[in-house]
């Protein structure tokens, strides 16, 4: 029987979430996505108008089908957490059931269960500021959107992930090595995400035999990465310094996600898997 995946953090065809969706679809999974509420209208209308048709193409020539797009804002767990100004914001008022708890309930009532949960989202409002200039509010916002959002997603989806299922997130080497420019507490948020990957692997493993891993991905020119402002430099740096001197494609990360979600990875859990052309292994630049 085919597996069903819920991928949180897909709002265009440029990011890792999209590539993961494609690799999972190519391996036969049914695809559900969670899209950030403010980006929902444009994503759905672009899908409908065929703007993504070229990038929906799978290796066998068929087009990836997204069975359903769910609105999601992963910084809110339940409706009680949503402040009035967000509730009445017109980009939010047009959709409903987009807190993490409500999204999990909606998936449950539509499909009953899933096998694969993917977290491919991050947000740090002060990412362009050095850590020494980051406010408490900005730091906590980065942790909320980029780290706790994963704890919350797994917590709320766990009851509907079939035993033996797999969950994964995306992280970045800035959690463990200094990457000047990756500020605003985003380096801290990725460190928390990686530590949580281990603890959640233990808890979800013992509870339901669910595996929890994170992919430490190399630089990709996604919408989120362009907002940080140094992505071209990081891509060039990798081309010069990594053991493999080629540009990283999102598909390479997608294929690793498909492997991790498959029975081929049945003993891998609690791990940080590097998909970065080997850049993380270098001790000095060359
Ligand atoms: P992206 O822009 O395709 O994905 C980020 C997504 O997060 C967007 O769709 C955005 O709408 C969504 N999002 C932001 N706040 C949200 C919220 N509160 N609720 C729900 N969704 C929200 O960019 P990218 O780069 O593919 O990011 C995916 C993951 O990959 C992130 O965790 C990122 O940190 C990670 N990553 C990216 C690298 C890169 O160079 N692009 C390198 C290593 C890791």
Image (cartoon, rainbow, N blue to C red):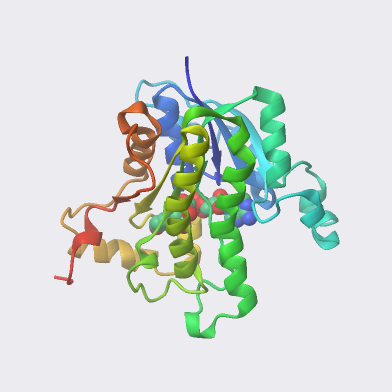
Percent x, y of residue 58: 40, 27
Percent x, y of residue 253: 35, 44
From the viewer's perspective, is residue 54 above or below residue 129? above
Q: Nearer the viewer, residue 229 or 252?
A: 252
Residue 47 visible in the current orientation: yes
Residue 46 visible in the current orientation: no
Q: Residue at x 79, y 56 (%)?
A: 82
Left or right of residue 162: residue 61: left
Q: Residue at x 70, y 54 (%)?
A: 76
Q: Residue furthest front?
A: 206
Q: Nearer the viewer, residue 74 or 68?
A: 74
Percent x, y of residue 149: 59, 53
Left or right of residue 267: residue 157: right
Percent x, y of residue 248: 29, 50
From the viewer's perspective, is residue 279 above or below residue 206? below
State the quadrant of the C terminus.
Answer: bottom left
């Amino acid at each position: 029987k085919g597996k069903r995946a819920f991928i949180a953090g897909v709002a265009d065809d440029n990011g890792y979430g999209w590539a993961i969706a494609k690799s999972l679809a190519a391996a036969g999974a049914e695809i559900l996505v969670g899209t950030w509420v403010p980006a929902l209208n444009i994503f759905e209308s672009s899908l409908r108008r065929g703007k993504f048709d070229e990038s929906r193409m799978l290796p066998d020539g068929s087009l990836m089908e997204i069975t359903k797009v769910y609105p999601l804002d992963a910084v809110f767990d339940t409706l009680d957490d949503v402040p009035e100004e967000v509730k009445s914001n017109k980009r939010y008022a047009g959709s409903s059931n987009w807190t993490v708890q409500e999204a999990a309930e909606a998936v449950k009532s539509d499909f009953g269960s899933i096998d694969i949960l993917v977290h491919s989202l991050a947000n740090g409002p002060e990412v362009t500021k050095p850590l020494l200039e980051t406010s408490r509010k900005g730091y906590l916002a980065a942790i909320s959107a980029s780290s706790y959002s994963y704890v919350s997603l797994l917590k709320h989806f766990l009851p509907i992930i079939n035993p033996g299922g797999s969950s994964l997130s995306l992280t970045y080497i800035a959690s463990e090595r200094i990457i000047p420019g990756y500020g605003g507490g985003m380096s801290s948020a990725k460190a928390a995400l990686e530590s949580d990957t281990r603890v959640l692997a233990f808890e979800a493993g013992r509870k339901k035999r669910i595996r929890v891993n994170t992919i430490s991905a190399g630089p990709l020119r996604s919408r989120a990465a362009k907002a940080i402002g140094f992505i071209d430099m990081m891509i060039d740096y990798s081309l010069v310094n990594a053991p493999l001197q080629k540009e990283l494609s999102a598909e390479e990360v997608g294929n690793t996600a498909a492997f991790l979600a498959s029975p081929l990875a049945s003993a891998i859990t609690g791990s940080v898997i590097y998909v970065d052309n080997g850049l993380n292994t270098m001790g000095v630049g060359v």
